[in-house]
Amino acid sequence: MFKKILIANRGEIACRVAATARRLGIHTVAVYSDADTSAKHVAVCDEAVHIGGSAPAESYLRWERIIAAAQATGAQAIHPGYGFLSENEAFAEACAKAGLVFIGPPASAIQAMGLKAESKRLMEKAGVPLVPGYHGADQDAALLQREADRIGYPVLIKASAGGGGKGMRVVDKREDFESSLASCQREAINSFGDAAVLIEKYVQRPRHIEIQVFGDVHGHYVYLFERDCSVQRRHQKILEEAPAPGMTPELRQQMGEAAVAAARAVHYVGAGTVEFIVEQRDTGVAPGRPKQASAPSGGSEDTSVPSVGVNNSEMTFFFMEMNTRLQVEHPVTEAITGLDLVEWQLRVAAGEPLPLRQEELRIHGHAIEARICAENPDKQFLPATGTLQVFAPPPCSEFAVSPVRVDSGVRQGDAISPYYDSMVAKLIVHGDTREQALARLDAALAATRIVGLQTNVQFLRHVLASHSFAQADLDTALITRESAVLFEQETVGLPLAAAAVVAHALLQEQCAAGGGWIDPWARRDGWRPHGITQRYFDLAFHEERHTAVLHYRHDGALHLQIGQAAAPLSFSQGTDGMVLQYAGQRFTVQVELSGEVAHVFTLRGATQITVLDALAHAGEAQAEGGRLTAPMPGKVVSFTVKAGDTVVKGQVLAVMEAMKMEHTIAAPAAGVVAELLFAPGDQVSEGAELLKLSVV
């Protein structure tokens, strides 16, 4: 086994690899950029080497600096994590030439599977079923248009060298193909340095099911069952689970053996994932209906857990791609198998045989992973940046199999920058059944408190509660299909939010006074020596202003009036937060303040309410019309209009790139473009005015 390894990555995966290495007694070396000088992954490793600027192209993609760091520190091997250089065959070859072990597959396997078109041709020769499409080398735009017409719409344009949902566009009709192709190619060049694309039939009601495979240098291969990754936004996964609901033992074995055949065809070594699109047909049978079935040969299931599934004839699978690395969602496989996949990677890279044979692998229970991301789902998942003023996960383990596990590369006080992806943490739960795992995940999300930037925590709770997800009616269109119950949802409400923020203010005043008696003339609560007194709180809730009136009664009781409704209010500090009683109901509430904004967390959900300073807001002007600003730091990709153009509300005016994705800027109202203030390629800060629009 290795004595020292360098981790050529950052964030959560670098911390994940370091945790297993520490348990095995292996010393670790971190690398870091300017932006990551004080990052968590730097702190948890034994040594750290600075490798360049904040942008990945100046640091984490500079493999010559990474190899030099490994040599300088005496590392014997390099773990690439996922993303960055993990699927770069030139980097794998450079490691070998430098006498370093690349903890991953051979460069030849990365190359064979790295280009989607080439890998599909390889799979076609191996007899693995493929989705109808065009995988050719000729990238003439007119030819691609004709191929899309031949295949039939809708089609999927996909970057040939792509991954992670980048460089992908669904085209529903012919007239949208040209613009979608151009956008896809731009994103492909920016993310992978290669504009080549392939075109495939967009499968209706598809499920995204992937098989975890492992190979060793001795020619042994196994599959560690499947993960369902169908719940996606912008072609990127946000919820993954294992095993896949509705999977029969027969189909599991067929897909597992096909995945192993794919790995064997390229002499694969280490951890890899073979991804399949599964086409499902409506049969009237619920995907989660129990079905008696024997375990497949070459693997076995825990018989204490009922099998669920549908007939094989109701599901057809097609090879999509192979990811030649560890996957973000690997913890759900670890949960149902009880294995440490990073340990397997290290052992295989050190030349050891696979720790288990296929027939020794078993499935135990059900696991679900939720990706907590810095983004605003209600604004088309716009990425968010900022400082984690509060980052309080639920009670959990970290980087270890348990009922509740949180893997994260950040700590409270750290910043989410525009240079890297938007993931804050992965929340993984494990239960005996899917129903138990669902309940455990919702409770863990409800106990998660993050303040300082927008996240998708509440959106994830809405997905879990949706009929489709709860009933395991899964496909990649689930978010679109359930949009009515996923977006713009307010689960706390004004009365509870107002009561919580008023009670929190009073509780803080009591704490400031030491919880005891203070001079009544120094009190801030409106106390009077006689009569009933009132105290006013000016609030803003979902951009509407409200006034809450707190009534102090003769007997010391409090009544809170919001609008025309008034009810008794009482509160106390509990072990898990503030215990609030209002309008005949009892709640446990946590309130976190960020300036004037109060973040209210309850079991119902979370919301924000602003306590307005009347003097500060007295002279506030109306928002200036006609200003279009950058919603996040990033680069201007293009403008679709010029000065003098007349536009309509909702028309796309500009395209920006941030956090590895393209984002469109639309007109808030009809008008005439007065002036463009930047040029394509310019870097802009958050809030920078991009263009002036004369509103009509």
Image: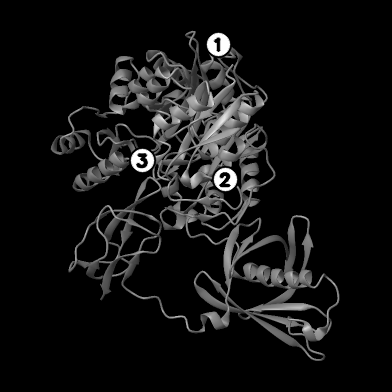
Above or below, 551 relative to 684:
below
Residue tagged 3: 166
Q: Which residue lies at the image location 78% right of the left edge and 69% below the top edge?
A: 511
Dot 2 crowding, Cα within 10 Å, few <14, some 14–19, many 20+: many
Color scheme of the displayed model = one colour
Which mark is nearer the camera, 2 or 3? 2
Identify the residue at the far bottom of this view.
530
Q: At which x and y percent is residue 378?
A: 45, 57
Which residue is the site of mark 2? Answer: 410
Quick one: quadrant of the N terminus?
top right
Q: Is residue 597 above or below residue 178?
A: below
Query: Where is 52 relative to 654, above or below?
Result: above
| Quarter of the figure with residue 676 | bottom left
Mark 2 or mark 3: whose residue is earlier in sequence:
3
Q: Residues within 10 Å of mark 3 (few under 14, many from 20)?
A: many
In the rendered structure, which amino acid carries the disc numbered 3? Lys
